Image (cartoon, rainbow, N blue to C red):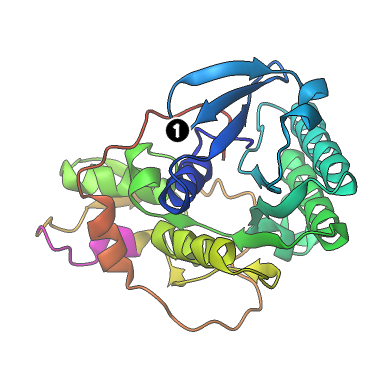
């Protein structure tokens, strides 16, 4: 597993633990090694990359990619190439039963929609396109939904998105709040929807590949500031800032979807008390 302590990594760990609480997990570390854990407990041992094949048993492995390195473009590209190389190596050795990854909505936008002053995001789009090509080549079933905006308690607890910051400021009745691009539309998906899709993929004995946008609905940041909430928090008063978006227009693509969860209900769920572990930098 890459990115075990990030938002999507945490979600994956919860789903996997629910299916097999005693599973062995090898968590990737910054130095390139892996920590071997049993059932989500304390690390039992450190495993070097060259020793991975020796860890294999009679059961096929699940490869989980829930990480991204946004420290810089070179770091991003090196990290993505490293993961892809290992994934293909394990697949060629017939060690993989399934591969789990997460693409981004950026992969579904034309390159022209990315502003010239954000070359890192253009590089990010390119890495996600290569990841999609990789999952098409794998011999094992692949789970690779595209996430535009993730909404849920893990993201809110870590204040890892603009909507989460706005919701927190609304709860605190913060004054002088500035919202950039409050009326730009964006696709969103609830963390619970992602978990449900992942659980279904893992439970099926012969699952079909999962591809394309995973969407519950479309929203804008003004909705987060104003939608009625169960706890009765008043609408947030804010002023509009200067646009800082990396993309031109709305963060959506041509995609037909059935509306899923209600945004207000997902925001209410995000405010519920959480027990998620502390955030880990540089993971998705």
Mark 1, Cα crowd under 10 Å, few <14 / some 14-19 / many 20+, is some
Expressed as whole percent of the image width and height from the top left, the position of residue 88 reads 86, 45
Quarter of the picture containing the N terminus is top right
Kindly identify the residue that appears in the image at 77 percent across and 64 percent down. 110
Kindly identify the residue that appears in the image at 25 percent across and 43 percent down. 169
Q: Which element carries disc 1, helix, strand or loop?
A: loop
Question: How many callouts does the rendering have?
Answer: 1
Q: Is residue 65 left or right of residue 86?
A: left
Quarter of the picture containing the C terminus is top right
Of 226 and 54, the residue lying toward us: 54
Kindly identify the residue that appears in the image at 27 percent across and 67 percent down. 264
Of 162 and 199, the residue lying toward us: 199
Expressed as whole percent of the image width and height from the top left, the position of residue 245 reads 58, 50
Kindly identify the residue that appears in the image at 55 percent across and 45 percent down. 244
Residue 138 seen by the camera: yes
| Res 210 → quadrant | bottom right
Expressed as whole percent of the image width and height from the top left, the position of residue 119 reads 77, 41
Of 34 and 70, the residue lying toward us: 34
Q: Is residue 174 left or right of residue 71?
A: left
Q: Which residues are magenta?
A: 223-231
Residue 178 seen by the camera: no
| Res 134 → quadrant | bottom right
Would you name the residue on which mark 1 appears?
Answer: 40
């Amino acid at each position: 597993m890459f990115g075990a302590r990030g938002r999507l990594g945490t979600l994956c760990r919860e789903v996997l633990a629910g299916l097999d609480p005693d599973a062995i997990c090898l968590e990737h570390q910054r130095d390139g090694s892996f920590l071997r854990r049993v059932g989500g407990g304390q690390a039992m041992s450190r495993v070097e990359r060259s020793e991975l094949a020796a860890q294999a048993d009679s059961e096929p492995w699940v490869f989980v990619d829930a990480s991204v390195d946004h420290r810089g473009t070179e770091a991003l590209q090196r990290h993505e190439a490293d993961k892809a190389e290992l994934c293909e190596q394990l697949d060629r050795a017939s060690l993989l039963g399934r591969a789990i990854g997460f693409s981004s909505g950026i992969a579904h936008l034309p390159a022209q929609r990315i502003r010239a002053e954000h070359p890192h995001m253009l590089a990010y789009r390119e890495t996600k396109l290569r990841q999609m090509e990789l999952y098409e080549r794998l011999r094992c079933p692949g789970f690779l939904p595209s996430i535009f905006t993730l909404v849920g308690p893990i993201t809110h607890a870590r204040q890892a998105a603009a909507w989460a910051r706005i919701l927190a400021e609304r709860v605190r009745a913060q004054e002088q709040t500035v919202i950039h691009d409050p009326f730009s539309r964006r696709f969103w998906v609830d963390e619970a929807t992602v978990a449900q899709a992942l659980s279904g993929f893992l439970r099926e004995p012969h699952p079909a590949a999962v591809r394309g946008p995973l969407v519950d609905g479309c929203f804008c940041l003004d909705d987060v500031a104003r939608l009625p909430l169960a706890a009765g928090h008043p609408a947030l008063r804010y002023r509009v800032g200067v646009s800082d978006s990396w993309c031109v227009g709305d963060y959506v693509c041509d995609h037909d979807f059935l509306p899923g969860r209600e945004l207000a209900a997902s925001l209410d769920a995000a405010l519920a008390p959480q027990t998620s572990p502390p955030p880990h930098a540089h993971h998705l």
